[in-house]
Image (spheres, grey):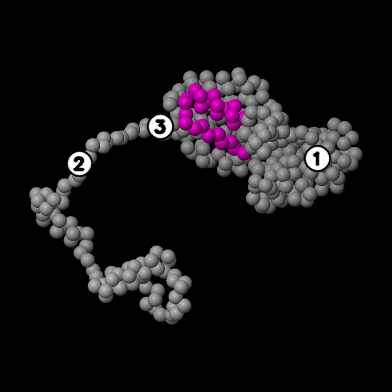
């Protein structure tokens, strides 16, 4: 009996060693050159004893009758007074809605923006869309995703920016009439600050391709730009000659706290400027998706190169910025 107990104790120690990754740091005499030292204890046991296979066990059990198990009391189960309970949960597949939104305010963020638990700006575009839709459809969750984003102080004009809404477990089937009602009511309640158009049913593919489309799209912007130097005809000619310009943009300082530090190559396809006073111009620019236009103007302390500030050898900054249009390469007109 003592020998059996010792063997059990040794086996238990081996099993514990395996559970800890097979690394016994308390043993100072481990032989690193011993090939058997790395072999798992379980594998050693399998070599010593090869039990019957699953097929063999099944064959053996199938040769017995149920009455034989019952006679040995192997099928007896204790009685219980506890009632059996069950629940049924019905869920609908996600419903997708696609559309475009325009934003005619410089005080509305795209999504809720809080800093130190204090709301920045007015109610967001996202909230203005998902709240009435969630209330009407009684969905568990409504998710909002857009093809890129504009800053809170940037207006989104033209035909608007693409967005997709994902309705999770909607309790209402969305007919074309209901979708038209949603679009009309959202526009009526948010006029003229936020408007949506072309609201329609979508699918998961619209949802997954949204971000890729944002990078592939081109955007046309209009900015009011301040130039420190007095502006002359030479300055205008320099800027108007910019075409298919490739720039390097490090992640801007203003978003570095939430974006990965990278250097991104972007394209400035076309620039058109008009002088409105000695130190101010209207700048129209068409860029590839994801371009930081503010940084293209002032240079972000050299992190965006070249910039309008570099071309004019003067400090420059944006006073106002609007997104005029978002389009793909086939629809590119400027």
The residue located at (30%, 70%) in the rendering is 8
- Image position, residue 201 (x, y; %): 49, 29
Q: For the N terminus, give its image quadrant.
A: bottom left
- Mark 3 and mark 1: span between their CA atoms? 50 Å
Which is more N-terminal, label 3 or label 2?
A: 2
The residue located at (43%, 66%) in the rendering is 21
Residue 171 located left or right of residue 104:
left
Picture layout, residue 302 above or below residue 204? below
Q: For the C terminus, give its image quadrant.
A: top right
Q: Quadrant of residue 196?
A: top right
- Image position, residue 209 (x, y; %): 53, 41
Residue 71 located left or right of residue 128:
left
| Residue nearest the observer in this picture, 272 or 204 | 204
Q: Counting other residues with Cα less than 10 Å from the Cα at mark 2, is it few (<14), some (14-19), or many (20 or more)?
A: few
| Residue nearest the observer in this picture, 227 or 21 | 21
Q: Nearer the viewer, mark 3 or mark 1?
A: 3
- Mark 2 and mark 3: span between their CA atoms? 39 Å
Picture layout, residue 309 above or below residue 324? below
Which is more N-terminal, label 1 or label 3?
A: 3
Which is more N-terminal, label 2 or label 1?
A: 2
Residue 118 located left or right of residue 299:
left
Residue position for label 3:
92
Q: Check disc 1 and report its element: helix, strand or loop.
A: strand
Determine if the magenta segment contains residue 135.
yes
> Residues at badges 2 and 3 in contact (C-beta under 8 Å)?
no
Q: Residue furthest front?
A: 2
Residue position for label 2:
79
Q: Counting other residues with Cα less than 10 Å from the Cα at mark 3, is it few (<14), some (14-19), or many (20 or more)?
A: few
Q: Nearer the viewer, mark 1 or mark 2?
A: 2
- Image position, residue 323 (x, y; %): 69, 33
Residue position for label 1:
317
Region in magenta: 125-148
């Amino acid at each position: 009996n003592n020998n059996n107990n010792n063997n059990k104790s040794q086996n238990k120690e081996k099993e514990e060693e395996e559970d800890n990754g097979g690394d016994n740091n308390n043993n100072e005499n481990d032989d690193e050159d011993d090939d058997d030292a790395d072999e798992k204890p379980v594998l050693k046991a399998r070599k010593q004893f090869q039990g019957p296979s699953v097929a063999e066990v099944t064959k053996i059990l199938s040769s017995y009758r149920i009455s034989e198990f019952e006679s040995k009391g192997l099928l007896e189960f204790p009685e219980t007074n506890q009632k059996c309970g069950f629940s049924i949960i019905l869920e609908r597949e996600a419903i997708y809605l696609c559309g475009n939104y325009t934003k005619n305010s410089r005080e509305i963020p795209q999504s809720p923006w809080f800093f130190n638990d204090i709301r920045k700006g007015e109610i967001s575009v996202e909230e203005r869309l998902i709240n009435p839709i969630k209330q009407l459809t009684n969905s568990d969750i409504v998710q909002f995703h857009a093809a890129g984003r504009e800053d809170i102080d940037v207006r989104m004009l033209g035909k608007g920016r693409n967005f997709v809404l994902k309705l999770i477990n909607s309790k209402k089937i969305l007919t074309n009439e209901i979708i038209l009602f949603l679009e009309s009511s959202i526009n009526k309640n948010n006029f003229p600050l936020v408007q949506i158009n072309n609201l329609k049913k979508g699918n998961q593919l619209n949802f997954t391709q949204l971000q890729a489309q944002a990078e592939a799209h081109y955007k046309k912007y209009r900015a009011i730009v301040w130039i420190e130097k007095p502006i002359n005809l030479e300055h205008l000619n320099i800027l108007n000659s910019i075409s298919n310009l490739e720039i390097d943009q490090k992640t801007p300082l203003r978003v570095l706290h939430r974006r990965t530090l990278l250097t991104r190559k972007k394209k400035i396809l076309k620039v058109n400027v008009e002088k409105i006073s000695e130190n101010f111009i209207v700048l129209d620019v068409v860029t590839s998706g994801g371009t930081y236009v503010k940084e293209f103007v002032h240079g972000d302390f050299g992190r965006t190169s070249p910039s309008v500030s570099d071309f004019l050898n003067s400090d420059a900054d944006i006073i106002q910025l609007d997104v005029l249009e978002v389009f793909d390469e086939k629809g590119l007109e400027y």
